[in-house]
Amino acid sequence: MMDSCDLFFGIDGGGTGCRAALCRADGIRLAEGQAWAANIMTNFNASRENIVAACSNALDNAELPRGLLSKASAYLGVAGANVGTYASDIAAALPFRQCEVSTDAQISLQGAIGDGDGVVAIIGTGSVFISRFDDQIQTVGGWGFVVGDLGSGARVGRELLQEALLAHDSVRLATPITSHILNDFLNNPQTIVEYAHSASPGDFGRFAPLVLEYMQQKDVTALRIWDRAIESVEETLTSIIGDRQTRLCLLGGFGKRYGEHLSDRFADLIVPANGTGLDGAVDLALRNFSTQFASREVE
């Protein structure tokens, strides 16, 4: 049987799902596994369970015993790792032999642009921006849905529910998209309020695609929400990029949609990502734990 010390996991945990790649010390991937969300700030215990489940599934897919989980090393990029002690707490709670934890933004940066300079905007259910210039990494945003994640699916979805309530109260004119939302909630604004008070970021985010759909129909409310989201994204990009001419990668389900609407200043910088966040996690796992991989890079 393969020496368990030669097994490494690269793990990408976000607000909508968790993926794990199992690889050997030489970088060869053996299998991948998936599980549900792994935002350690939003739901720590469920995130731990989903991280373990994704890795266990990868071992199953590689036809290796799950007992190797506690003997393998892992590099995790997970949402919420930039706040408080969540990163060290999840590292201590996981069963791996060795474990390093960073944000999902950092593995996305590594996967998208490798070791060079550039900026990555990850905009999905949440949002975070990360850059590397002259080996200095800067992260902007990623503070969570309640006080951050501007331009994200969750924030856009929440704004849509807010607009529906404003239309119901005749503060703003009703438009097809607000009527759609009110109809979804049986034309009962109290139901919207009750939903919002218990909703997760993902619950809000499921309404965001409606904004894109109705925006194509020139719905005034959808256009207003989308314009505010673009303004937030461009304001953040301006603060990070300044007057540099650099690479810009847009990641996440919403990130790719922004590329169609950004001003020329940023649209001209957009390049395809070299790889995914999971690719970045695998790369960092090997750099941190594999002496075989590290010695090969030195040559």
Image (cartoon, rainbow, N blue to C red):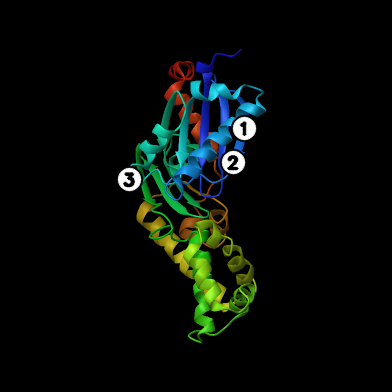
Q: Earlier in the sequence, mark 1 or mark 3?
A: 1
- Mark pair 1, 2: CA separation: 8 Å
Image label count: 3
Q: What residue do we see at 37% from left, 38% from top?
A: 89
Residue 188 in the image: state x and y as whole percent.
Answer: 58, 78
Give the crowd class for mark 1: few <14, some 14-19, many >=20 residues within 10 Å.
many
**Are the residues at dot 2 and dot 3 in contact (C-beta closer than 8 Å)?**
no
Q: Secondary structure at mark 3?
A: loop
Residue 251 in the image: state x and y as whole percent.
Answer: 53, 49
Which numbered tag is attached to residue 106? none
Q: Nearer the viewer, residue 299 or 169?
A: 169
Q: What residue do we see at 42% from left, 50% from top?
A: 129
**Are the residues at dot 1 and dot 2 in contact (C-beta closer than 8 Å)?**
yes
Q: Earlier in the sequence, mark 2 or mark 3?
A: 2
Q: What residue do we see at 61% from left, 75% from top?
A: 177
For residue 242, side relative to residue 27 (left or right): left
Q: Amino acid at mark 2?
A: Ala
Q: Nearer the viewer, residue 292 or 159?
A: 159
Residue wearing tag 2: 35
User: In what quadrant of the picture does the N terminus appear?
Assistant: top right
Residue 125 in the image: state x and y as whole percent.
Answer: 52, 55
Q: Residue furthest bottom?
A: 170
Above/below status of 231 relative to 109: below
Q: Secondary structure at mark 1?
A: helix
Residue 138 in the image: state x and y as whole percent.
Answer: 35, 45
Which numbered tag is attached to residue 84? 3
Give the crowd class for mark 2: few <14, some 14-19, many >=20 residues within 10 Å.
many
Q: Amino acid at mark 1?
A: Asn
